[in-house]
Image: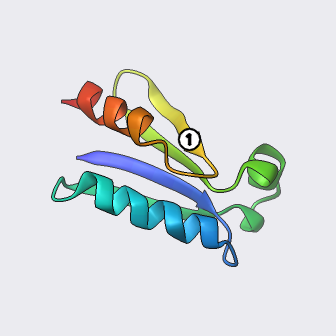
Amino acid sequence: MLKFTLYSRSYCHLCEDMALALKALLGDLPYDLEITDVDADPALVEKYDELVPVLTGYSVSNGWQQLCHYHLDAKAVTAFVQEQS
């Protein structure tokens, strides 16, 4: 199953937009999306503060990798999904 983490904020409309765009892009493909509030962890604020929302995907061969930030990069996510097949 595809695994993604969306680094987000509770008041971030771009974060909500990215989650919805991911759902639309993946359609019926099974995937797991964990939404993590960066403001709950100072280390995440330091790493992602100005980039939120940030979408990462988990690959068995490469571990977690950043796929896009601000807006969903459909090409990057599609390429990531194809690599996992």
Q: Nearer the viewer, residue 13 or 7?
A: 13
- Vertical side of 14 occupied by 59: above or below: above
Asked whether the viewer can see residue 43, the reply is: no
Q: Nearer the viewer, residue 76 or 55?
A: 76
Q: Nearer the viewer, residue 40 or 35?
A: 35
- Vertical side of 26 occupied by 19: above or below: below
Q: Is residue 9 left or right of residue 74?
A: right
Location of residue 80 in the rendering, given as x and y in whole percent from the top left corner: 35, 32
Asked whether the viewer can see residue 3, the reply is: yes
Location of residue 23 in the rendering, given as x and y in whole percent from the top left corner: 33, 62
Location of residue 77 in the rendering, given as x and y in whole percent from the top left corner: 39, 39
Number of numbered markers? 1
Looking at the rendered structure, the kind of residue marked 1 is: Cys
Q: Is residue 4 left or right of residue 12?
A: left
Residue shown at 40% from the left, 34% from the top: 75
**In the structure shown, which secondary structural element does the residue marked by tag 1 occupy?**
strand
Q: Is residue 46 left or right of residue 64?
A: right
Residue shown at 21% from the left, 58% from the top: 27
Q: Which quarter of the rendered picture does the C terminus lie within? A: top left
Label 1 packing within 10 angstroms: few (<14), some (14-19), many (20+): many
Q: Would you identify the image quadrant in which residue 41 lies?
A: bottom right
Residue shown at 53% from the left, 56% from the top: 6
Location of residue 18 in the rendering, given as x and y in whole percent from the top left corner: 50, 60
Q: Would you identify the image quadrant in which residue 78 lies?
A: top left
Residue shown at 82% from the left, 57% from the top: 42
Question: Label 1 belongs to which residue?
Answer: 68
